[in-house]
Amino acid sequence: MVRFVVEQEDNGKIRCDACPVLCFIKDGRTGACDRYANEAGELVRVDAFTVLQRIDDPSAKVVPFLLTESDIDESADDIHAATSATQSAEADPMNAATVQWDGDLLGNNRTFVTAIGAGTTYPDYKPAPFIVSQKYDDVDMVTIVTEGIFSYCGAKVKIDTDRHLGPEQAVVRVEGEAIGHVMTGEYGSQMLSLGGVNHLTGGSKKEGRITCNALLELCNCNAVEMTIDDGAELVVQAGKAPIVNGVREHLMRVGCGSATIGMFATQWAPHVDEVVVVDDHITGVLSEHQAGKLLGMKPTGIRIKGRRSTPGRYFQVAEPGSGWGGTDIQDPLSILDDFKPEFAYAGLRMLMVSTTGEQYAYFELDEHLRPVASSLPDTLEKSVSRIAENCEPSLCSVLFMGGAGGSLRAGVTENPVSLTRSVRESLTYVSCGGAPAYVWPGGGITVMADVTQMPKNAFGYVPTPALVAPIEFTLRRSDYEKLGGYMQHIRPLSEIEKEVERAESVRNSLTWPIQKHHYAWGV
């Protein structure tokens, strides 16, 4: 458990200075954030200080391990026995390939110190809680770890679904409070922008509190219920399928209607005269599409309601919704006008299908050139199933996004701009809880990271309100000295062994924060 030196009041309380709230905490109690506690007059960090332990088996399941100070002194066998219950509880029944930690905390360049449980730099004149040195391939490396207090933060959420969630710019709400908005739709996904400083601090106290709590739950991979104005009710959880209006999604569309035509045209052409792939964005028509032309498909006289773009591609065939292909239709024939009699004929075979293959119908034209529903022939059943087979599972992706270009940098160097320049010059590698962070171009250090790549419960909060997120800066020791780092505060990895409380295994195949290509720029 990480401990901090603080002044004790006459009444036995201690004052926590880990965030701007400055709580007075009684002995045996925690502060408002539940992250710091008073233990016999000492301020302690409640969450476990965490390191990542690399494993060599790429098929192994990531398994968390809990390690106390007393456990470190035990033998490896004792540690394995003590953690077996945890392993059983966390093991994925779908993946029996699990790995046990061998008890070797510091061996073979396999350990990376994360900021999870390390503590903050607030007030930010202080050096980072842990500035750790270790060798990697005979190169002296330094990792500076801090739990940043992010008032300027949010989450970008990608929801794989064709269902219409709400109009762009529509407000996203949790418990009735605005926490974000709908962004522009992407290929087979709906996008949300949640949080940000204006929702955290620019509205009412309730709005800020609920926004902060929603971000905390999302970033810790927990489910959050939300609604969209003039749109859907959602349950969003990172790494899980979204639930839209009470229905769990299964498949992300294989592509737009035109793309689906291109992918499966050769499988349809011998067995059917016309195929219409219904899609909210681009509905495809096989006989008119270039793929159909090249395969010798003849005109069918079909007429599609909507705006014709290019041959075989139609926009705006219906309104957005939760029906066929993300439209509001339940009857696919509603997007058709009468067939042109100079091309159409009785017995013409037509397949209509959605971009996930979940909806399909087969028709043949009668003597009046009207489509009549028929059973799907066996020759087409395989192609419809193949559409679904080629669809990715529908998931929610949550990317934490935070601005680290402010006073947090003072915990790394006395001249904060030098850290920004080092990041820009790719001399300093940025990670969040060990997960690779994308650094946005432009001013400051604005980072974005996939929360599912971080250890569990990597995020905390302070009731200012703000998220507390782990951030690590890794660079060569020589470069750290050049940017004016706190060289006198560097501690070797072996020295912090007693302070580590949790080690989590990560696959060797995943991006490793200190692997060679992250620090070899310019060599």
Image: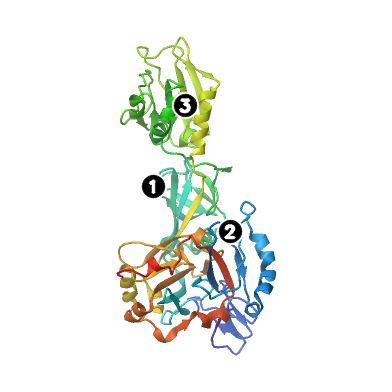
- The residue indicated by pointer 2 is 61
Q: Residues within 10 Å of mark 1 (few under 14, many from 20)?
A: few
How many circles with numbers are drawn on the protein?
Answer: 3
Q: How far apart are marks 3 and 1 (CA)?
A: 28 Å
Q: What residue type is labelled 1?
A: Thr
Q: Check residue 352 in the rendering and tell me which mark sits there, or answer none.
A: 3
**Mark positioned earlier in the residue sequence (3 or 1):** 1
Residue 521: % across, % down: 32, 68
Q: Residue at x 57, y 84 (%)?
A: 14
- The residue indicated by pointer 1 is 184
Q: Is residue 519 above or below residue 345?
A: below
Residue 223 placement: quadrant? bottom right
**Mark positioned earlier in the residue sequence (3 or 2):** 2
For marks 3 and 1, give the one nearer the viewer. 3
Callout 2: helix, strand or loop? Answer: loop
Q: Distance between the residues labelled 3 and 2?
A: 42 Å
Residue located farthest toward the top when viewing the structure as drawn = 367
Residue 141: % across, % down: 41, 76
Residue 417 placement: quadrant? bottom left
**Mark positioned earlier in the residue sequence (1 or 2):** 2
Q: Do the residues labelled 3 and 2 touch (CB within 8 Å)?
A: no
Residue 493: % across, % down: 50, 79
Q: Can residue 113 be seen?
A: no
Q: Which residue is drawn at 43% across and 81% down?
A: 127
Callout 3: helix, strand or loop? Answer: strand
229 left or right, relative to 284: right
Q: Residues within 10 Å of mark 3 (few under 14, many from 20)?
A: many
State which quarter of the image contains the N terminus: bottom right
212 left or right, relative to 202: right
Q: Are marks 1 and 2 in contact (CB under 8 Å)?
A: no
